[in-house]
Image: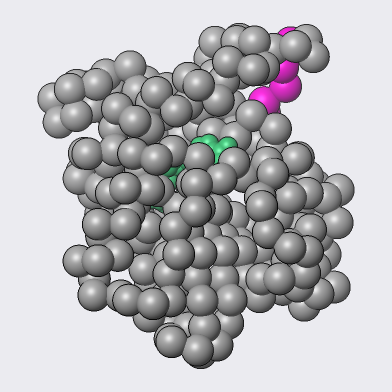
Amino acid sequence: MSSPTDQNTTHFGYKDVPLNEKVKLVADVFRSVAPKYDLMNDVMSFGLHRLWKRFTIAKADLRAGHIVLDVASGTGDLAIAFAKIVGTTGKVIMTDINEAMLQVGRERVEDAGIIGNINCIQANAESLPFQPNYFDCISIAFGLRNVTNKSAALASMYRILKPGGKLLILEFSHPTIPMLNKLYDSYSFHVIPKMGELIANDKASYQYLVESIRMHPDQETLKTMMMQAGFEDVNYFNLSGGIVALHMGYKY
Ligand code: SAM
């Protein structure tokens, strides 16, 4: 679990860095990987990320007319799927701190032929610039572990969710099957950075990815953090043996 060694530092993968530097280091990672981000996701996860996202979309249980925010939306997989469900009477806002990732997202929205019900806004998850009690549903997929102050991000999402609204957090987590753990560690540390080097010409960013996953709070810790931010009925589903978990919570 991520616990900075002192109050002025935080984790960037396995490194301890000054608190105010992490956001720039994370920005450098995603600026670098943006052009090959989608390809790398498919290759690294053997396409599994599509199933994890499909499960998340089903659990969002959206209807036409809903107003949805996808935080750390990146290249927009969830936002695009949500826009198709909420239709022209609804609205999806995709936000990300990183302009390079959002730009790929904008192009994918255009390619998907979605016009009118998606807006892209550059924003930090820690201070989302929206009015209170506005969204029916908020999602953040594979984004929270990159955020410096996760409690601030949870509080920010809570503030702008409508009473009755739902938060979905899809994120790498901690495998629950010991045998899987060893295999997963070996694949993560030996294969993924090499793939990053070969496909995205960037080994360091994929080394960060692997390390940041290990430093992310485990299932129960994240559940507690969500409850501390005010979310109720918090629960989670382990996917692929806990390699990924989908946490859900409500604002009442
Ligand atoms: N949600 C997309 C998906 O599931 O494919 C993209 C996930 S990508 C691994 C992580 C994203 O989080 C990047 O696009 C990055 O720019 C964004 N991010 C990192 N820190 C952020 C922050 N503080 N606020 C908003 N977005 C952030």
Quarter of the figure with the C terminus: bottom right
Residue 167 lies in the magenta-colored region: no
Vertical relation: 148 (above or below) 131: above
Residue 2 lies in the magenta-colored region: yes
* Nearest the eye: 24 or 36: 24
Which residue: 64% across, 10% down? 18
Which residue: 70% across, 32% down? 149
Q: Position of residue 3 (x, y in %)?
A: 72, 22
The answer to whether residue 169 is seen in the rendering is yes
* Nearest the eye: 101 or 234: 101
Q: Position of residue 155 (x, y in %)?
A: 78, 49
Which residue: 68% across, 41% down? 126
Residue 35 quadrant? top left
* Nearest the eye: 225 or 238: 225
Q: Position of residue 80 (x, y in %)?
A: 36, 68
Quarter of the figure with the N terminus: top right
Q: Which residue is farthest left?
A: 198
The answer to whether residue 190 is seen in the rendering is no
Vertical relation: 110 (above or below) 38: below
Q: Position of residue 183 (x, y in %)?
A: 36, 32
Magenta stretch in the rendered image: 1-5
Vertical relation: 100 (above or below) 209: below
Q: What is the basis of the colouring in this image?
A: one colour
Which residue: 44% across, 38% down? 98
- Position of 104 with respect to 156 (left or right) is left
Principal SS element in the magenta part? loop
For the image shown, how many numbered marks are present on the structure? 0
* Nearest the eye: 242 or 49: 49
Vertical relation: 142 (above or below) 181: below
